[in-house]
Image: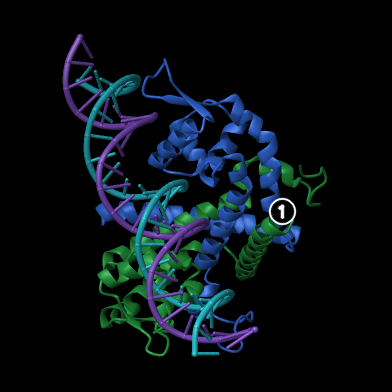
Chain colours: A blue, B green, C purple, D cyan
Amino acid sequence: MPPPEWNGQGMSEIQLYADPTNSIGYLTRIAFRAFSRALEVRTSPHGVSSGQWRFLRVLWREDGLTQRELSRRVGMREPTTVIALKSLERSGFVKRQKSVQDRRKVHVFLTPEARALEATLLPAVAEVNAVALAGLTPTEIDILRKALTQVGRNLAIDADEITSTDSAA
Amino acid sequence: MPPPEWNGQGMSEIQLYADPTNSIGYLTRIAFRAFSRALEVRTSPHGVSSGQWRFLRVLWREDGLTQRELSRRVGMREPTTVIALKSLERSGFVKRQKSVQDRRKVHVFLTPEARALEATLLPAVAEVNAVALAGLTPTEIDILRKALTQVGRNLAIDADEITSTDSAA
DNA sequence: ACCAAATAGATAGTATTCTAATGAATTTGG
DNA sequence: CCAAATTCATTAGAATACTATCTATTTGGT
């Protein structure tokens, strides 16, 4: 049960986090899930899942990437990319083509069907962002973007430290 | 398609969003996954997964909740809660007990083992928040918290509209 | 030219989460 | 007081991601 004067400027972080609902981690998770649902609602009528959409968005900007590069840009691990690409291939949205220079590599290309979707899907999904950010000032949005970026970076560094300290210390 | 002068602030939103890496949705997803990993690293040595931890955190504050109420507070759908509770029960962290007043209801209680973990786990996880927010000013953190809350709320409303418009329009 | 190390991708197995549908108990309204 | 609606929990089935491990290929040092 949240205490009476809860969220004033002077409150310590500890006390804030005592209410799980105020923790940045919780809020981030809720926002992420809400984004996914909003995406899904708009893309699934076109036969595109939210997961597939994340890959298409990158490929629309640059076609023919290798799977590794694609993983990096989408922000997923490689096994996840493999699964996503299989699904995209089944759906007829991409073709995979082995490199002749380096036969380990596989380049990923969009099909005409996937290209045709860009004009339909990008605006529909731009709407998700517009809806999400309603009621926030441009300054707040800038800070949100900057802060989320920082949080991601901070925690990535943390992960590196933890895993390397594992064997070091 | 988003109009040309979109958002005041110099760079148009279109251009920002043209780079997927700048979209709030993308940044939220990356931050969320980073949080989960950081959590997992700190809780798994104690036999607690990040998913389980989210439920324990709520139960430490209030024990004996029904599954529905627990779902609401944790921010998960009910089937997810059922699965999580099964896993928590297998791990010996909770007991479930049918209500005698209303035999539809199941109350969830922590075991002594789970209670004992609170003192260990809460500080470990507080560290995740501290690490995540490093380099941000208190004002930025306030705005981040406020903005994430707003985004979650906006998208929840969106979901309601979409699903109810389904049958209405 | 050869073999060790690095790189690219794929596979296996698991965890988390969702939607949709079902079952069981309770409440409500005629 | 009973039929219909509601509420709470669960099951079934799928998508999304992960870690750990494996295979194939390339590269670099000797």
The mark total stands at 1
Give the camera-side residue of D23 and D11: D11
- Image height of A152 relative to B125, above or below: above
Measured along the vertical axis of the image, is residue B6 above or below residue B160?
Answer: above
Q: Position of residue B97 (x, y in %)?
A: 33, 82
Q: Determine the secondary structure under disc 1.
A: helix
Q: Please name the amino acid that badge 1 sits on.
A: Ala
- Picture residue at 50% right of the left edge, 65% below the top: A25
Residue B79 seen anywhere in this rendered image of the structure: yes
| Nearest the eye: A142 or B19 | B19
Point out residue D27 in the picture as x, y percentages from the top left corner: 34, 21
Q: If the image is split into quadrants, where does the C terminus of chain B sit?
A: bottom right
Q: Residue at x 75, y 61 (%)?
A: A137
Where on the picture, by quarter, is residue A161? bottom left
- Determine if residue B123 is in view: no
Point 73% across, 43% down: residue: B14
Instruction: Name the side, left or right, on which B53 lies relative to D4.
Output: left
Q: Residues within 10 Å of mark 1 (few under 14, many from 20)?
A: few
Q: Which residue is mark 1?
A: A130
Q: Position of residue B17 (x, y in %)?
A: 67, 44
Quadrant where the N terminus of chain B is found in the figure: top right
The image shows residue A165, relative to residue D4, as above or below, that is above
Which chain is disc 1 placed on?
A: A
Q: Nearer the viewer, residue B124 or A130?
A: A130
